[in-house]
Image (spheres, helix red, strand yellow):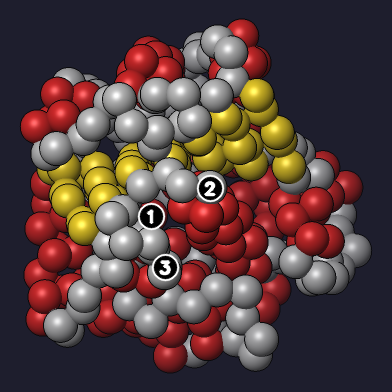
Amino acid sequence: MRTDGDVWDIVSGVGLTALGVATFRALETAAPDPLIRDDYAPLFVAASGHQHFIGLLADPSPLDDIPLVPGFMGFRTKFFDDFFLSAAAAGVRQAVIVAAGLDARAQRLDWPAGTTVFEIDQPKVLEFKEKVLTEHGARAKAERRTVPVDLREDWPAALRGAGFEPGAPTAWSAEGLLPYLPGAAQDRLFEHIDALSAPGSRLAVESFVAGADVKRFANVESKYFGQYNPFGTVDPAELFYDDERADPARWLAEHGWSVRAESPSELAAAYGRSVPDLPDDLDDLWRQPRLLTAGR
């Protein structure tokens, strides 16, 4: 369970969920006709020494009876990849990955010359990430600047200290983040992003409304994970906050952002992927418009 001011590394708490997501990106990369390519993901998993995820890469068959978990991560990763590439094509040369985890977009994506990519996350997570990338001689395709800070603290000051320019258009992402923040911290996150975003800025968010969404996720998880939890010893739902918070799409629209919301089902169609018939509860979640892009 979460506590005020809790911290984590890559094999504990919220950090362990980032390792799980890296595992699913690695599995998508190894699949026939993958939606994305992340050759760094298996390196992170191996370096972690976490036997559950190392075993899952060696034998992913336990996932066969769990609907859509690895597939969704492929859709989600491509959604955010395409967001950044579209922003770069439009001339945005400053990107901020909020709660970067083991995201290796600075190395994976073909950024235009002159692009700076800022990665914000817990110090221990970024330290682990840097060690693995350095050991494997990974080179960023943009100027990469890490910002080791807790998002519940004054992260805008840390971001500016790393060279962020508030007067330049920025592409922001918040992927797989919001339910791990207290409601007040989430609302401050959007307030800070709004204040730091010059005209021409863009934002991509995986939306998650508290309360009912947390309960629905927990119910579906307990029903379909059964005797096998793809995240190993961590239960993501137990790390979520379910306190009150603003609805991201509504908040952004009310503050002058143009917002577009898409569901995983719509992304699957856009990416030419078929989805098997799903039970009603899963189908409902699959059709929820939870992936947002916004611009100002």
For the residues marked 2 and 1, what is the alpha-carbon distance in whole angstroms?
32 Å
Residue situated in front as seen by the camera: 181 or 161: 161
Quadrant of the frame with the C terminus = top right
Residue depicted at 65% across the width and 90% down the height:
32
Q: Looking at the image, is mark 2 or mark 3 earlier in the sequence?
A: 2
Q: Quadrant of residue 162?
A: top left
Q: Residues within 10 Å of mark 3 (few under 14, many from 20)?
A: some
Residue 136 x %, y %: 17, 84
Residue 90 is labelled as 2
Residue 45 x %, y %: 30, 75
Residue 109 is labelled as 3
Q: Nearer the viewer, mark 1 or mark 3?
A: 3
For the residues marked 2 and 3, what is the alpha-carbon distance in whole angstroms?
15 Å
Residue 165 x %, y %: 23, 31
Q: Secondary structure at mark 3?
A: loop
Residue that mark 1 sits on: 17
101 lies above or below 291: below
Residue depicted at 57% across the width and 30% down the height:
295
Image marks 1 and 3: residues in contact by CB distance under 8 Å: no
* Left or right placement of residue 12 versus residue 81 in this view: left
Q: Nearer the viewer, mark 2 or mark 3?
A: 2
Q: Secondary structure at mark 1?
A: helix
Q: Residues within 10 Å of mark 2 (few under 14, many from 20)?
A: few
Residue type at mark 3: give it. Leu
Q: Residues within 10 Å of mark 1 (few under 14, many from 20)?
A: many
Residue type at mark 1: give it. Thr
Q: Quadrant of residue 180?
A: top left
Residue type at mark 2: give it. Ala
Residue depicted at 72% across the width and 52% down the height:
264
Residue 49 x %, y %: 21, 77
